[in-house]
Image (spheres, rainbow, N blue to C red):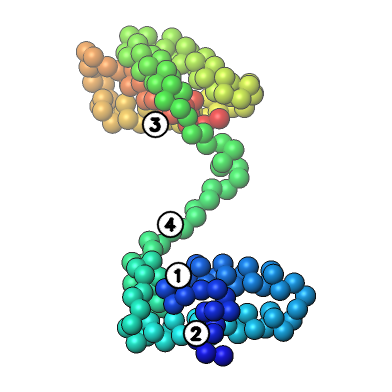
Amino acid sequence: MSNKNSYELLGLTEASTFEEIQEARDRMIHECGDEPKQKEAVEAAYDAILMERLRLRQEGKIKVPDRIRFAENIPDLPPSPKAAPNLSRPEWLSNLVDTPSRDEVLWPAITFGGLGLFGFYAPSFALAIAIGAAIYFLNRKENRFWRSVLLTIGGLAAGLTLGLTVGQLLIPQGAQMAWASTDAIAAAVTCLSLWTVSSFLR
């Protein structure tokens, strides 16, 4: 079958676009119904037109649209950045560590900051209020009172240990400082510890 007959069979001209050729083929196949010979003739005409178009493009007689890309002309894509390894936390740690909102960090910070300063005047009283505040802030998150008490005790123990050590390093044995004592420094460090526990644990 000549190329001219192929175009005529599909009702096309040599100026027809690829989309028009496809539409004509689909329409003709649909019109053929259960006639295998007619379907075969339509497919042969369609293939002949495509082969002629391909030959003309390779010879440079038909301009290739910009949106069409050939495999040999695919531009080199920049390498995709490597995904960071997924460092998932253990489940027990995920259940313990919290990702607080700004308010869940800010209000305890104000509370414990004030108590830390007050601890320079009355360390024991400031620590008593700080313990109650820590239990309150922790219990408010998930309503688990005894877990809040345990976390507060842990924060208290860590804060007192660190605070007393820092206090003894800053204030030599027997020395008196007008602005601070070992107990006051321990109270301030403990307030910081309780703020960390109440803000970032649950």
- In front: label 1 or label 4: 1
Residue at image location 44% in from the left, 83% down from the top: 54
Earlier along the polypeptide chain: callout 2 or callout 4?
A: 2
Q: Write down the residue under mark 1.
A: 17
Q: Nearer the viewer, residue 173 or 53?
A: 53
Residue 127 location in percent, x, y? Answer: 44, 15
Q: Write down the residue under mark 4.
A: 84
- SS category of the residue bearing label 4: loop
Q: Amino acid at mark 1?
A: Thr
Distance between the Cα atoms at labels 4 and 3?
A: 35 Å
Picture quarter with the N terminus: bottom right
In the displayed structure, 119 sits above or below 62; it is: above
Q: Would you identify the image quadrant in which residue 184 lies?
A: top left
Q: Residues within 10 Å of mark 2 (few under 14, many from 20)?
A: some
Q: Would you identify the image quadrant in which residue 172 lies?
A: top left
Distance between the Cα atoms at labels 2 and 1?
A: 16 Å
Residue 4 is labelled as 2
Q: Write down the residue under mark 3.
A: 162
Q: Residues within 10 Å of mark 1 (few under 14, many from 20)?
A: few
Q: Nearer the viewer, residue 57 or 32?
A: 32
* Badge 2 vs badge 4, beta-carbon distance below 8 Å: no
In the displayed structure, 163 sits above or below 31; it is: above
- In front: label 1 or label 3: 1
Q: Is residue 12 visible?
A: yes
Earlier along the polypeptide chain: callout 2 or callout 1?
A: 2
* Badge 1 vs badge 4, beta-carbon distance below 8 Å: no
Q: Is residue 121 shown left or right of residue 149?
A: left
